[in-house]
Amino acid sequence: MENDQANEIKILQGDRPTIANQREPVDLSSINFIDYIGRFYSPELDISYSFKLEDGKLKSKIEGQQKFLD
């Protein structure tokens, strides 16, 4: 543990362990969120996603939801 936070988690699935390490924080200052605004369709899932920018945050909505999520 560092700074009272776990660095990894061990998940047991039957006799098979999976270890997931903590990821480094992402620097969001270099991301242009305007590039992600719009409606996108996933043929694999047969569902549409909408993204919008509100108060500097990218919000998403899955087709059929009434409101956008942070």
Image: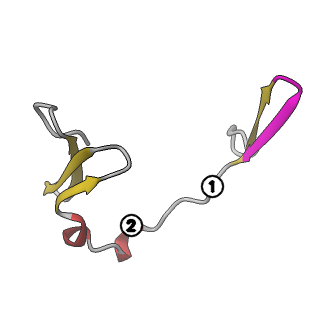
Give the spatial CA distance, label 1 vs label 2: 14 Å
Indicate the amino acid at tag 2.
Leu
The magenta segment is 14-20
- Give the number of the disc on residue 23: 1
Magenta stretch prevailing secondary structure: strand
User: The C terminus appears in which quarter of the rendering?
Assistant: top left
Instruction: From this view, report whether residue 4 is shown above or below residue 15.
Output: below
Q: Give percent across and percent down for residue 57.
A: 23, 55
The residue where tag 2 is placed is 28
- Tell which of 36 and 39 is nearer to you: 39
How many numbered dots are placed on residues in this image? 2
Q: Position of residue 53 (x, y in %)?
A: 15, 58
> As shown in the figure, which amino acid type bears the numbered disc 1?
Arg
- Please determine whether, in this image, residue 47 is positioned above or below residue 31: above
Residue 27 location in percent, x, y?
A: 45, 68
* Circle 2 residues within 10 Å: few <14, some 14–19, many ≥20: few
Residue 18 lies within the magenta run = yes
